[in-house]
Image (tube, rainbow, N blue to C red):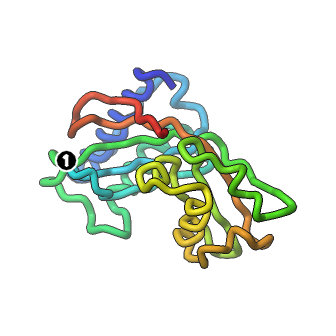
Amino acid sequence: MNIDEGGMAVRTARDAVETITRDQEPLELHLPGLFMEPRGVFVTLKTFPARELRGCIGYPEPIMSLGKALIKAAEGACHDPRFPPLRVEELDHIIVEVSVLTPPEELDVEDRRTLSELVEVGRDGLIMEMGPFRGLLLPQVPVEWRWDAKTFLCQTCIKAGMSPDCWLERTTTVYRFSAEVFAEDEPRGETVPKPLE
């Protein structure tokens, strides 16, 4: 995505956040062709200026158009079950971040101990899956926390509600994906690409 398309994605998510929080009518989408293509996407809300997580919901797989997924992810981020619902008075003090994902790719290796060699911090996001347990961490998370690849694998297991070393088990399915990330530089401000390295 170029910066104009990234800006359009962030503005669409911001509009959806404002609409749902103010209990207004749902948005009508008038977006160009790229936004009609199925894509996975996450919308993250952070406080400003502290940039602490306030909500993050999304769709890892390309099961709906990017435009529709943006709206639904933004609405979900306003009601992230880890936090109280977003309030109108918070709208001036949050920034909106959008991560547009590539389709997840399974990492299947004979020796599970070599998995960390296939994971590149600053490029990859991870999904862990075992039975009913599933967890995802976006590519920007290990960068923000300064994790190495093994710590990233362990933390994704924890996010899934599993023990940290479950990535070593053959019963655990591990996926990686990448993302293009765009965010407001301040509440309702300019959109900037977010470097992951």
Residue at the (61%, 68%) spot, across then down:
134
Where residue 14 sits, quadrant-wise, is top left
Quarter of the image for residue 96 reads top left
Nearest the viewer among 115 and 11 is 115
Residue 69 at x, y = what percent? 49, 44
166 vs 110: above or below: below
Identify the residue under disc 1: 49
Pick out the residue farthest to the left.
89
Decide if residue 71 is on the left or right side of residue 128.
left
Tell me if residue 72 can be seen.
no
- Residue at 31% over, 67% down: 83
Q: Look at 69% across and 68% down and name the residue there.
A: 167
Residue in view at x 35 percent, y 37 percent:
183
Looking at the picture, how far across and down is residue 138, in whole percent? 51, 51
Q: Nearer the viewer, residue 36 or 158?
A: 158
Q: Which kind of residue does numbered mark 1 sit on?
A: Pro
